[in-house]
Image (cartoon, grey):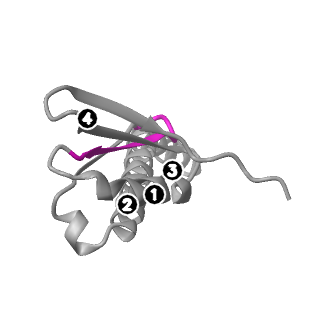
Amino acid sequence: MSEGLAGLVAVCAIAVGPIALVLALLNARDRRRDRTVAIVLGVFNRRLSSVVALEVRARLLSRRTVAVLDMSCCSGDVWPTIRRLASVLPPDVALVVLTHLDGSVPVAVTLRRPAAQPA
């Protein structure tokens, strides 16, 4: 009787284990994306958040997350906020800014977190 029960438990573990692993990875990816969205929207005020488009990408098997900001409709007064955002993002989040520098040529700018200041 115990051998049959042990076999049933082993078959269930083999069948359910991969599904549980995929669900755990999906949950972790979604939490990384939600965390990044919360950080980005926390830095922007209401006026700026209505003119900046945000897309957050996170891969299933990587801890890296990419926040893409489309600032095609923004003026130059948003850059101090973008610099502040780059300084508060965690190291595993890349910030890519899409903009038009002279009004016609699209440009992608990647900002990195500043290096730690020596004490």
Residue 67 colored magenta? yes
- Calculate the distance from the C-alpha at mark 4 to the C-alpha at mark 2: 22 Å
The residue beneath circle 3 is 5
Decide which of 5, 98 is in the foreground and name it. Answer: 98
- Check disc 2: other Cα within 10 Å, few if <14, some if 14-19, many if 20+: many
The CA distance from mark 4 to mark 3 is 68 Å
Q: Amino acid at mark 1?
A: Leu
The disc at residue 35 is: none
Q: Residue at x 53, y 51 (%)?
A: 1
Rendering coords of residue 82 (x, y %): 40, 54
Q: How many marks?
A: 4
Q: Are marks 2 and 1 in contact (CB under 8 Å)?
A: yes
Residue 81: in magenta span: no
Q: Nearer the viewer, mark 2 or mark 3?
A: 2
Q: Which residues are magenta?
A: 60-71
Toward the viewer: 30 or 70? 70
The image position of residue 83, as x and y in percent, is 47, 53
Which residue does the numbered mark 2 point to in the structure image?
40
Of the residues shown, which amino acid type is indicated by label 2?
A: Val
Three-letter code for the amino acid on which mark 3 is drawn: Leu
- For marks 4 and 1, the one nearer the N-term is 1
Is label 4 or label 2 in front? 4
Mark 3–mark 1 Cα distance, whole angstroms, equals 55 Å
In the rendered view of the protein, which quadrant contains the C terminus?
Answer: bottom right
Going from N to C along the chain, the mark reached first, 2 or 1, is: 2
Label 4 vs label 3, nearer the camera: 4
Q: Earlier in the sequence, mark 4 or mark 3?
A: 3
Residue topped by disc 4: 101
